[in-house]
Every structure is written in structure tokens, then in C-alpha cells.
Amino acid sequence: MNPLIQFFSFQDPNIRFVVIGAILLTASSAIVGSFTFLNKKSLIGDAIAHAVLPGVCLGFLLSGTKNPVFLIGGAFITGWLSLVAVEFVVSRTRIKEDTAIGLVLSVFFGIGILMLTVIQKSGNAAQSGLDNFLFGKAAALVGDDLIAFGAVAAILLVTVFLLFKEFTLLAFDKDYARAIGLPVRWISVTLTSLIVLAVVIGIQAVGVVLMAAILITPAAAARFWTDKIRVMIMLACVFGALSGLSGAYISFVAPAMPTGPWIVIVISTIAFISFFFAPRRGVVSRVMRQRTIRRTIHDENILKALYHLGEDCKDFTERHTAEEILRKRNIGSDHLERVLMRLKRQGYLTTANGRWQFTEEGKVRAQRVVKIHRLWELYLTTHLNIAPDHVHDDADTIEHLLTPELEAELEKLLDYPREDPHRAEIPYP
Amino acid sequence: MTQNDLQIIATAALVASSCALLGCFLILRKMAMVGDAISHAVLPGIVIAFLVSGSRDSVTMLAGAGLVGILTTFLIEFFHKKARLQTDASIGVTFTWLFAVGVVLISLFADKVDLDQDCVLYGEIAYVPVDLIILSDGNGLILGPKAIYVTGSILVIILLFITLGYKELFLTTFDPAFATALGVSTSLWHYLLMSAVSATTVASFESVGAILVVALLIGPAATAYLFTDNFKVMLVLAVVTGVIASVIGYYIAYWLDGSIAGAIAMVTGILFALAVLFAPAHGLVFKRLRATVQP
């Protein structure tokens, strides 16, 4: 049978367990991780992930079984302990937060490894499989695991649902939350407990090192597509589930492949695509936008230079050579050539025998830039009391940005003045 | 103490010294977590270098890992600056991705690559005395454990790097603006330092694993930082702390019959905790005492 059909028909109970388990883990981690991300505590998730290992071993040592209740209980305690340790070190010593996190995570993990190796050599037969906590075992989930994971996932979802407003407020404006009388301390303790819980179950899917990824990466990816927190969390959840599903599928098709790392590779790929290609916030769209703005500025500066030349000879229909323009605004002759050609294409300039002349639209646009520049200089001197020799640079920036509405308001405010502070005429159409 | 004990402790102490020296720069630059990220992210570099060169003990491996270390640093900055991703998330996304790629590469080429995940995380320092360099010119002269030579050379390189570039490293760490004004390139020294961290990680990972590297990078330096305000003293104290942790850690592991790397990491934590309490200048106990003596 086609493996794709065999997998997605979910006939095989093993496939069902793995898929449901992987999706439960990744999706619930993504939801809790969104708040970790928004609180700028991404690396805390990493620290907790490492710090649960000694707890798992402790749970095993004390109970002698791999009963998930003891293991999760132990993990919960040391996970919390690591956070308390980080907070203590940061608040009581001169050690910075990143150092404290790195130290706590490596030391807790070292203790965990020490305990794990001691347990492994103790000859206790029940210990086999404890090292699943190190690298995850998403491909080997069974029914019992699902009950435990499902219960924890349900706790996470219900708590986030009930405290959604509080968590959001805490992430964006802690001071305001405190001012309106919310119990900030308890809310953040609850949120941290949720993170610890999410880590404790997630770690069984992808392992210690990669746990930070399924917490943070979906949220980081989702952040690039929206500014609305609800949409962001939904997206993070979908991205997480998608990566869980693909990871399960890949290790079904190629059984030698580890599920956890593939989950992380899929979610990272989604994140990289988001970083680069998301509309508005993505790198590509940001670079494009910057280029458009830069071009507008260059275009308008050259139009302005030509306008100044026109003012000098009191005739705006006069033709000017590139050298004359360069004397007004030196941007390099190759670059000037490109800008002039672009302006010609757009219908602002015409050329004949290497000399350049405004079209009617070109003159109007240049005049507007010059007008805004001079209005702004006047505004800065009269209303903000800035010395006339300090206003030019500021006006050079604003002339490309001011909207027509603000332009009209400025004119009205200054009562349609005739001259700027340097006695240059302010041109009106 | 048998010869085996001595060899293992010597390897650990050599790694600890290199890490402690670099760690001082890392924690003062607030880049401790970048060190953590690099120590995980070099994994794909190691695997690829292994595939290319076909052996474990080559310069290729150091070069490969050095490049991946620089790539990691670059990616973290790129996502932060160009995509405006917050730094912590940028670090988290980058190193988990590279580590995952490394683990998948190991599984893909399992028959060709003699590496496994456990070893990457917590090393096999106990096998140091087994892997010997033997001259194959007929009389089979045994030169001693390979790991000692590798970690020893790295320590020499790190010492040279820090001695020769001390002024530049010092300036770019404490006053980047002043360094730039003097014409010292902050980004050049930033990348050089990161390459040094990557090289140390790679040279050490086989014997002590990624986690112990992180513990040794951060722990001794943080401990030393609580004792002194003088940077040179801090470097020396960090090395001393690292070596002490290696010796005590080894004996604890020996006594419990557990992972040596894990035990050494634990001891760095204990030493740090002691420093937090009892360091003369910045320890909590003496602060409390001073507060009661001078009300």
C-alpha cells in the first residue's frame, strides 16, 4: 500500500498513538511557548528542559518504577527549582541573567547525567528507557503515554483559556497589570508552572536539547505573520501540530530516522520561511520597502537639486547638465545617471543632448518637496525655537515623509508664509 | 592514583583551563548563552567534517566546526538585526535547528560516522586512556592518550590567542565604543572569539561532551567573577576553579561509578554556590556581616 495513504488513513493503532501524541505535545507546547516568547524568556524554556532530568532520575530512584506520576512529579520539582535558582542568582549576586541561565542548565543537567549513569549501572532492570528523556521517543509512544500527555495537555489548554487575559496583560504591560490590582506574582507563578508542565511532557517527544525549539520556534514563526495575539497563538499551534505530524510521518516512512530532530527541522523550516517571506515583517519585504523609500529619497533629492538650479537662473524650463546637478547634490555620477533615467521613465524629466528639463509633473513634485522643506524649517524656528542654522538636516528628512494632510495643517498653522528663515521663497502651486 | 586516573584528570583539567579562559570573556560580554548555543550547534560541522575527512582526529574537524561556530554567531545576529527577532529567541531557534540537523546527519550516515548522540552530550572521558597515539614505524612507540594531545594543543592555541590579542579582547569586551574609536574592529574580535569557542568545543566534545563544555565555560568564570574586580586575576582564578572542579568531579564520579562529565559539571555548580555564599567581596555571608557591623 502507498505509505502516504497507509499513514494518513490512521488505521494502524500504533500510527494513531504516535500521531495523536506528537500533535498533542507540539501543539500544547506551542501555546504555552507563545507566552514564554512574548515574555522574552525563550532561554528559560531551555534551562527548564535541561533541569527536569535530575528530577526524572530522582522520581525513579525514590519510587523504583517508571510510573509517569512520579517521574513527572520529580521533573516538576527540579524544573521549578532551576527557575528559583536562576532568579536567586540574578537578584542576589552581580551575575547577569544569561550567565545564570547557562550555569544552572548545565549544572542541573550534569547532575541529571550523573544520576542517570549511576542508575544505569545499578543493575535495576526497570531503568531501561529512562534515557528516552534525553533524546525523546515520539516514534514509540503507546496508549498509556497518551493518557498522561492528554491529561497534561488538557490542563494546559484549560488554564490558558481561563487566564488568557491575565497572561496577555502580563506579557505586554506588567506595571499596568499590577496597578489594576491583578495578583501578578500568582499569575506568573501559574504561567511558569505551565511552562514546566509543557516541558516535562514535551521532553519525552523530542528530548532535552530540542525542547526549547518546540516551545519557542512556533511562536517566533507565528509572530511574523500577525500583530494579534489570538491569531499568533492559533498560528503557533497550527505550526506546531504540522511539525508534529510531519515528524511522525517521516519516521514512519524511514524508521531509522529520529522523530524529535525531524519535528524540529520542520518547525525551523517553517520559521525560516516566515522570517524571510512573511509580508510586512519578513526580511525580504523589509528590504524591498527600504529600497523603495531609499529610491523615493534619491529621486526627490535630485528633483530638488534641479529646482534649486531653476531658482538660480529664475527659469524652471531651463535645461541643465548632469555636472550642474552634481554640483548641487553630489551622489556620484553613475548613481545620478540611474536616478535621472528612472525619473525620465516615470515622466518627471525629459532629456535632450545630455541636458535635463522638468516635465510639468516633475516641477510640481519638486516644488512640493522644496515647499515642505522650507515650511518645516520655519516651523522649527518659530514654534520650537531652534536656531535657523540647526534646522536644515531635520527638514531634509521630513520633506520626503510629510503626508498631504500634515502639509495642509502646517500651511494653515504658519498662515501661508512667503519666506523661510533663510529668506528663501516658499513656492506655492 | 593510577596512570589512568591521572590521564583522565589531566584531560579534564586541560579542557577546563581552555574553557575557563574563554568563559571570562563570554560572561563579561553577556554572551554566555551564545557559548551554550555554539557548543550544541557545532554538531553538524563535526559530522560533515567527519564525512569529508573520514576520521576523527583531523584538522578538518576543527576547521569545519570553527566555520559552523561562525555561522551560528552570524545567524543569531542576522535574525536579530535583519528580521528583528528578539535575541533570546534568535539564539534558541538557531542552535536547536543546527543540533537537530546534526542528529539527523548522524542517523543518515550511521554506518559511516562513528558518533552517537549520548557521546555528543556527555562525552566519553572515561575512555581517554584507551585511545592512544601509537607511532607505526615498526617499534610501536606509545606516545600516550590522543585526547591529552588534542586538548593540550587547544589550550596552547587559546593561551597564544589571549596573550597576543589581550589588549584588543580586553578593549572590545569592556568598552566597544572606545575600541572602535581606536580602530580595533569589534566584529573581527567578536568572530575570532567565537571561533576560539567553537574550536575548544570541538576539541573537547569527544572527551567531555557538549554539556560539560558549557558548565566549564560558564561555571569557573562566574565563580571567579564573584571574587575579584581585576580581570587578569579573574582569568587565573577561573582556571584554578576549573582545575579544582575537574579533580573533585573525577573522584566523585569514581566513588559513585557514574558519568565523570556529569560529576564535574555538578562540582562547578557547587563551587559557584560556595562562592555565592562565602566570596569575600561579593558573597552573601560577608555582605550580611558587613551590614550588621556598620549599621
Image: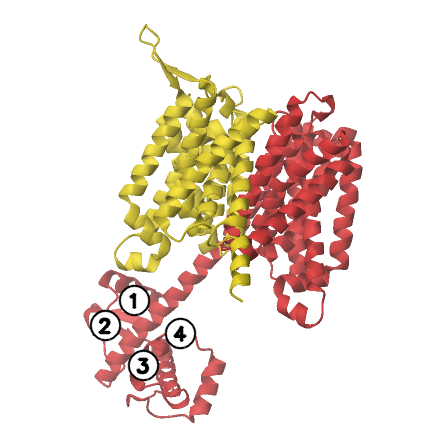
Query: Mark 4 or mark 1: which comes first in sequence?
Result: 1
The residue carrying mark 1 is A340
Rendered shade, chain B: yellow
- Alpha carbon separation for disc pair 2 and 1: 10 Å
Chain letter of the residue carrying label 3: A
Q: Is residue B22 visible?
A: no
Kind of residue at badge 3: His
Secondary structure under tag 4 reads loop
Per the image, the residue denoted by label 3 is A390
Between the residue at mark 4 and the residue at mark 1, the CA separation in whole angstroms equals: 18 Å
Residue B100 appears in the figure: yes
Instruction: Say whether marks 2 and 4 touch (CB < 8 Å).
Output: no
The numbered dot on residue B206 is none
Tell me the number on the disc at residue A325.
2
Give me the residue at 58% from left, 47% from top: A217
Tell me which chain the residue with mark 1 is part of: A
